[in-house]
Amino acid sequence: MANSLKSFEEKSANIAKEFNELQRNKFNDLLLKQEQTKTDTENKLDKIRETVEKKLQVLQEDNHKKLEEMRVTVDEKLQTTLEKRFNDSFTLISDRLELVHKGLGEMQTLAVSVGDIKKVMTNVKSRGIMGEYQLANILEDLLTNEQYEKNVKTKVGSGVNVEFAIKLPNNNSLEKTLWLPIDSKFPKEDYEALVDAYDDGDPLKLETLRKAFKNSIIKNAKDIKEKYIDPPNTTEYGIMFLPFESLYAEVLRTPGLFELLQKDFKITITGPTTLSALLNSLQMGFRTLAIEKRSSEVWDILGVVKTEFGKFGTVLEKTKKKLQEATNTIDQAGVRTRAIEKQLKNVQELPASEKQLKIENEINADAIDIENNIENILFNETDSD
């Protein structure tokens, strides 16, 4: 039993030894194969690496070349674009600077103009000249020089002349002119204070300044009435011209002011637009009067023509009568001629020359008689006329 176990152990040991030896051999073979595979793999990887490196080298060179070409192209285009943009920008900036410079010049001119306007507006005399100038332009545009005059003394005994006066037909005297006085007014201080009060919105201040503005307009209306209105040398009313529509609108906005001026002072307020409408109406009236005057002249001429035409009919009738008398005389001469011819038939013929001479003498005598009769008729007609 012990020997059997020992023999089994020996066999087992031998088997284990053989197995280990076999396993070692297999492992060594595996290591050799693995080493060979590793070597082959490394060789292949080296070849692949070399190939990839070559390809990468070629690709890098090609990319570098293309990138260089792209860089050159981009640089050229960028340079061209930048130059164009810079040139355009400089041109635009130059234009803008020129416009700014021009605008600054205009602003300076405007500032000077505003300053001049401010001086005009703050000076009472200058304001009056401005209103007078605007009024003169409107009159010049709508009326002829014969229909109005400047600086006219409309009131007898007054040493003040009205700025403008329109010539109207005078029913009482054809030789004497009837004047319609027009004077421009501009109460600037009261009006500007009233406009500022509208902006402030203070009711008490607004009411006070409205009264001041109203009193200023009434004062100007009274001034026009006392200085320039003098019937029958002028119309019974005058015109106050306000050079701005806003100023005229404020007069209309003031309750009862327009009616008060017409009723108590015989003054009509007008702005530029309303004055133009009024002058257009007057111009139509002037044209109507001219047409009426020409119509009366035409009727007078037609009356003269009618009278002369009647005389012409009478003369024509007398002429017809005298022509009839001349015709009768010619007919009588014809009868006498035929009687002579009848008598000549019984006369013995004379030699040709003697007979011809006798006939010619008789014909000439008859012709002279007829001619004398016609001349006597016409001569007597002329003497009777």
Image (spheres, rainbow, N blue to C red):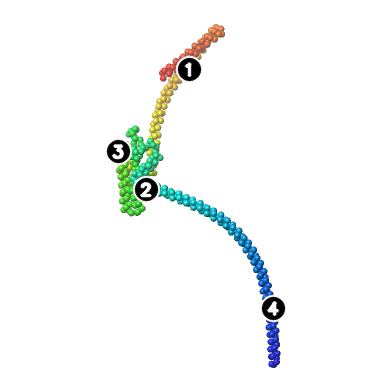
Residue pictured at 41% horizontal, 27% vertical: 305
The span from disc 3 to disc 4 (Cα, nearest Å) is 151 Å
The residue located at (68%, 79%) in the rendering is 28
Tell which circle, 4 or 1, labels the residue nearer the N-terminal end: 4
Nearer to us: label 4 or label 1: 4
Name the outermost residue toward the bottom: 1
Task: Tell me which numbered mark, 3 or 2, is placed earlier along the sequence.
Answer: 2
Task: Report which residue position mark 2 lands on.
Answer: 118
All told, the count of numbered labels is 4
Disc 3 to disc 2, how far (Cα)? Answer: 34 Å
Point out which mark residue 29 bears: 4
Task: Find residue 165 and report its horizontal and vertical position in percent.
Answer: 35, 38
Tell me, yes or no, whether the two marked residues, 3 and 2, touch with CB atoms within 8 Å: no
The spot of residue 262 in percent (x, y) is 32, 43
Mark 2 or mark 4: which comes first in sequence? 4
Q: Nearer the viewer, mark 3 or mark 2?
A: 2
